[in-house]
Amino acid sequence: MKLLERTIELYRSMKNPSWEGAFLYGGVNVNESLISLFNDYGDDLEVEFENEQGDLLNPEDLASYSFVHVKFLPPRKEFSFFAKDFEDYLANFSFRTQVADEFYISDLDGFCSNKKTDNNFIRSYLKIIDLYGLLSRISDHTDKDESNSHKHIILTVSGKEEIPVVYGFDDICKFYRCVGAVDIVKLEEDVFSAPHKSAKISLLKKSIAQYLAPCGEYEKFPTLVAKFIDIQKTYSNNYDLFVNEFSFEDEKEKLEKNKREYLLKLNEILGGVHGKLLAVPVSLVIVAGQMKPSTVENYYLINIIILIGALVFALLMWMLTANQLHSLLAVKTEYESKKERLRLYLRNSLYNDLSNSFDQLDSRFKHQRWMIRFVDLLVLIGLIFSFLVFEYHTHFLANFL
C-alpha cells in the first residue's frame, strides 16, 4: 500500500482530526499498523507523538501506549497530494490545469488515483480538467501569468479573448449538477475529426466568445464552466446550420427579405380589391338611375337589359375575385413551403426564432382573404339591389304571383 493510502487510513481512524497549517493533528489508537507506518515513513511525515497530557513522546516508546495524539505532515507532493479541502488542493502546484497522479480531499473523503474516483465532486473537477485540455487545443496559445501562476487561454475570434484559468470549489459544485450531461472527451473528438475540422474549431471558439463577452476577466472561466452546456448547444446548433449550408443570421436576413416580398405580393392583391370596391357602388348608382318606370315606352325591355347587365357585372366580379383568391393562395403555398423547409432543417429553438415572420404573413393573408370575401358580399348585395329596383319599376314578381 502506498504512503498516501496508508495516510488516508490513518486519518480515517483519528479522533477529532484538525489542521494546524499543513499539519494534521488528532488522537489515534496505537496498533501495529500505526507503528509500521511511522517506522517506514516517520521522517517523510515529520511526525510528533504526545501522550494524553500533551507531553512529547519518543517514537520508540509508542508500543507502551494504547492511545496517543499525533501530529504529522501528510504527503503534499505534485504526484501525490493530501488536501484539507478542494480550495487547498487547487491552490497548490498547477492543479487547476493538471491532475495529480493520486490525491485525497479530506473534507469530502474523496480519493482519486489515475483519474479514477467514486466521488462526484472529483468527477466534476476531472471534467473541468478535460475542458481545459479542450480549450488548450482550440486556443491560439496559452500564457502563464508569472505574478500569480495562473494560466491564460488566448482565443482569437473577432478579437483577442483572454481567459484566466481561475476557479474554485463553488464552480466545481455548479459543474457537478450538470456533469452527467457533459461529455467533453466526446466533444473534443468530434471537433478535431474530419470533415470541417477548421470550421468546427472556429464555431466552438465563436460560441465560447459569445457567452464570455459580457464577463469580467476573472469571471470568464467560471462562466465558461457554469454555461458550458449552453455553449455546447449553441456550437451544435451552429454546426448543424453550417452542415446544411445555413448561417442562422444569414437565413434570418434572407427570411426578412422574403417576408417583404411576400407582403408586397399580398398588398398588390389588396390594391386590386380596393379598385373593385369602388366599382360596386358606382354600378349600383348606374343601375338605380337607368331603370325606367312603367310610364316609359318599352320600359320592361330596357329594365331587363339593365338587369342582365348587372348580372353579367356580378359574374365578372366574382370571377375576378376568385382569381385574386387563387393568387392569394399561391402566395400562401409559396411561403408555407419555405416555412416547412425551415422546420425540417432547423432545431426547434432556432425555428421558433424565425416563425414570427410567418405569423405576420399568416395574419396578412387572413386580412386579404377577408377583404376579397367582403367584395363578394358587396357584389351580391348590389345584385340583390338591382333585382329590387327592377321589381319596383316592373312589378314582375307581383304580376307573376
Image (cartoon, rainbow, N blue to C red):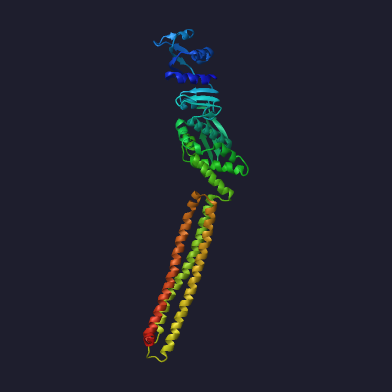
Q: Is residue 281 above or below residue 345?
A: below
**Residue reaching furthest to the right:** 194
The one nearer the camera, 143 or 207, is 207
Height in image: 151 above or below 381? above
Residue 35: percent from left, percent from top: 50, 12
Tell whether 165 sits left or right of 295: right
Q: Which residue sits at x=49%, y=73%?
A: 320
Residue 265 in view of the camera: yes
Q: Answer with the quarter of the image where residue 160 lies.
A: top right
Horizontal and vertical percent position of residue 124: 50, 33
Observer-nearest of 369 and 186? 186
List x then y, in percent, for residue 173. Answer: 45, 33
For the N terminus, give its image quadrant. Answer: top right
Horizontal and vertical percent for residue 157? 55, 41
Identify which residue is drawn at 55% across, 25% down.
101
Which image quarter is the C terminus in? bottom left
